[in-house]
Structure formats: C-alpha cells, structure tokens
Image (cartoon, helix red, strand yellow):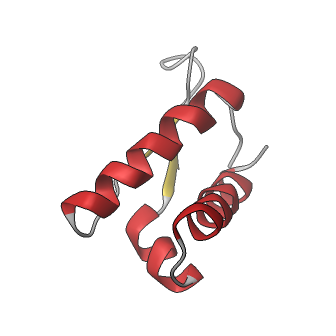
Amino acid sequence: MTAGEIQDLFIATLTRELGGGRRRWRLSVGNVRVYSIDTHPHCNWAVTPSGSAGEIERVERVADVLRQRYPIVTE
C-alpha cells in the first residue's frame, strides 16, 4: 500500500459515506506523510486534516480505521 493509495481510500470512503465532492475531501484529508519504519514501527503514516470541526472529526475517524487495516505504507 502506498501513500497515494491510502489517500485514495480516504477520499473514496468519505465520499461514499458522507457525500460531497472528491475535491472537497481531498482538501480536507491533505497529504499523507510517511515516516521511517525505524522510528515508527507500528504505524508509519499520518494525515493532518483541515476544514470544519466536523470534517476534521470525520477524517480522523476514517484514519483510525485505515491505520488498523494498513499500518505500514510506502511512499
């Protein structure tokens, strides 16, 4: 799984579950940052969502699910 694939999963999940446009959710999710497995052995990626409080909360909920399924990604 790559960072781009994780971002696509975020956008597809948010669009399917909550509606709205893909562009809106892409902006809310932002970029997926990938860290070294040496320093982050359990989960090596993160996002910094933006938007309204509700949008940020929704992105964080999806992030929790995706971290469980895909804890390690590549750039």
Q: Residue 31's spot in the image, x, y percent?
A: 48, 61
Q: Residue at x 60, y 57 (%)?
A: 10
Q: Residue 26's spot in the image, x, y percent?
A: 51, 73
Residue that sits furthest to the right in the current view:
1
Residue 1 occupies quadrant: top right
For residue 43, side relative to residue 9 (left or right): left
Q: Residue 21's spot in the image, x, y percent?
A: 54, 85
For residue 4, side relative to residue 63 (left or right): right
Q: Residue 6's spot in the image, x, y percent?
A: 67, 51
Residue 26 visible? The answer is: yes
Q: Residue at x 74, y 49 (%)?
A: 2
Q: Residue at x 68, y 49 (%)?
A: 75
Residue 71 occupies quadrant: top right
Q: Is residue 22 above or below residue 75?
A: below
For residue 17, side relative to residue 70 (left or right): left
Q: Residue at x 22, y 68 (%)?
A: 52
Residue 30 visible? The answer is: no
